[in-house]
Amino acid sequence: MGRAFVYVILGGGVAAGYAALEFTRRGVSDGELCIISEEPVAPYERPALSKGFLLPEAPARLPSFHTCVGANDEKLTPKWYKDHGIELVLGTRVKSVDVRRKTLLSSTGETISYKFLIIATGARALKLEEFGVEGSDAENVCYLRDLADANRLATVIQSSSNGNAVVIGGGYIGMECAASLVINKINVTMVFPEAHCMARLFTPKIASLYEDYYRAKGVKFIKGTVLTSFEFDSNKKVTAVNLKDGSHLPADLVVVGIGIRPNTSLFEGQLTIEKGGIKVNSRMQSSDSSVYAIGDVATFPVKLFGEMRRLEHVDSARKSARHAVSAIMDPIKTGDFDYLPFFYSKVFAFSWQFYGDPTGDVVHFGEYEDGKSFGAYWVKKGHLVGSFLEGGTKEEYETISKATQLKPAVTIDLEELEREGLGFAHTV
Ligand code: FAD
Ligand code: NDP
């Protein structure tokens, strides 16, 4: 025997939390909605885990960062779900899904049936073993995807003060964790295969701004190479890492951030998969009309670029969640999801935002000094397609966002665009 719900959200991360709030705003009745999640806590703002959570003084701890505080909205504590008649099934993994029968089977053996299913399973961190390196299970090798990972990392940080950390990967996790480690007085060496950090988004010039600052804070960069093996002590704790270029780095702590894979395996062979994610239409509806997908796991049409994309960022998780709920509960009034890709990060006193697509010719503007902004535009086929800004004000970020959303023609030459800088976005 099992339970039956009208709406089931599979996964209890960022997208699930924002979907729950939207359901209540649109008038879901008691007992109609169930969220089932492998994590033991109610949905929370995952970005906090690499930032406030790792601070040495007054670190962020739950319940302070449950969704939806990241969008300055209500904080949904477990009591909130109870008060709103939402069944929150925590610490429970879904083992299989039968899309044809509209049922889920949980690890506890319960069958849950739905009328509408929203897949919000997010992604898992890639493991070093997938690149042929053994040792991920050592107690001082840390990944960072969920609260359990963050608790472990915080504990290892505490016991590594003034020690050495090796950070593997120069993406978001690598850059944000390296900054947090420095703040915790740990010596950091970053290792990644590319020529500069954040290679898929940053230009060499943008990357050098951050890398120079990190160096001034004592961070060392070893680029163009990868980890080949760990060395262990008798307790199976890592003591050093060996790199392909022959370097040998002593390590009290290793942080690994080498990308993610969306959690689609429950649906392979049942739903259409594209670009590694569950393919959905502009209503976030999958190839089965009763099943929707949101957040990191969804590949959806980005209208502005006429392309299917899977985005791995929190703003997309929040907005795709709201859109899917709107499409389910108010199908007539819900139009196409018209999403402008938005990424951001905060490290040390830096704060940047990026809107659009980092393709085409790039023009940098401004010179970074404390208190002054620095930015870049990407121009493709004569149109503005991407904007980056470090150190902007709220209004300036809104300005570049609005300008990029309009994808305006750039009729001036690139030198003039560079001279106009932010002024260009103001004229759009
Ligand atoms: P998730 O939040 O990952 O939630 C997925 C949920 O599904 C989890 O609770 C998981 O346990 C559950 N689940 C999966 N499979 C099953 C199953 N079979 N049964 C039951 N439950 C299951 N983005 C930004 O834009 N800015 C940032 O500053 C930023 N910082 C980040 C910092 C960190 C440390 C991390 C890890 C990510 C960060 N991100 C950031 C990315 C952002 O957090 C994600 O894009 C967002 O969490 C995606 O939301 P989601 O709901 O799709 O997936
Ligand atoms: P990213 O994809 O951002 O970066 C992974 C990095 O690791 C890339 O530089 C990648 O290189 C490199 N890499 C890949 N394989 C290896 C290897 N074998 N050895 C060394 N380096 C390698 O993923 P992260 O792990 O940093 O982040 C995980 C997820 O968390 C992402 O979805 C990200 O969006 C999210 N996140 C977002 C934040 C934000 O938006 N501010 C903050 C923190 C996390 P290559 O590019 O060549 O593959």
Image (cartoon, rainbow, N blue to C red):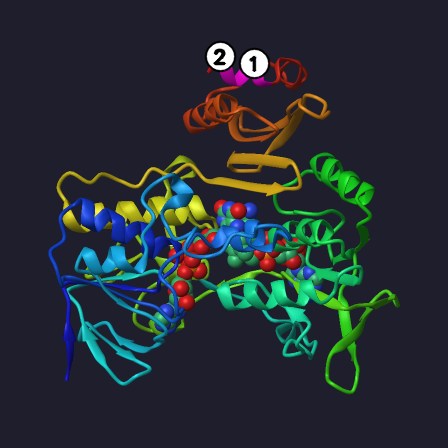
Query: Does the stretch in magenta take in 167?
Result: no
Q: Nearer the viewer, residue 75 or 116?
A: 75
Which residue is at a point 36% across and 53% down the rendered structure image? 15
Ligand 1 within 8 angstroms of badge 2 C-beta: no
For the residues labelled 2 and 1, the Cα–Cα distance comes to: 7 Å
Where residue 4 sits, quadrant-wise, is: bottom left
Q: Is residue 404 left or right of residue 185?
A: left
Question: Relative to residue 144, is residue 363 depicted above or below?
Answer: above
Look at the image and tell me in which quarter the N terminus lies. Answer: bottom left
- Can you identify the residue that label 1 sits on? 423
Q: Amino acid at mark 2?
A: Thr
Please count the marks in the image.
2
Secondary structure, magenta segment, majority class: helix
Please report contact status of discs 2 and 1: CB closer than 8 Å, yes or no.
yes
Where residue 242 sits: x, y (%)? 82, 71
- What range is drawn magenta here? 422-427
Res 263 label: none
Badge 2 element: helix
Q: Is residue 327 in sight in this rendering?
A: no
Relative to 173, residue 345 above or below? above
- Side of 288 relative to 388 (left or right): left
How packed mark 1 is, by other alpha carbons closer than 10 Å (few <14, some 14-19, many 20 or more), is: some
Q: Is residue 402 left or right of residue 83?
A: right
The residue pinned by badge 2 equals: 427
Taking the image in four quarters, ligand 2 sits in the one at bottom right
The three-letter amino acid code for the residue at tag 1 is Gly
Quadrant in which residue 150 is drawn: bottom right
In percent of width and height, residue 109 lies at: 27, 85
Where residue 246 sits: x, y (%)? 88, 68
What residue sits 32% from the left and 50% below the top? 18
User: Could you tell me which residue is drawn at 25 percent across and 58 percent down?
Assistant: 81
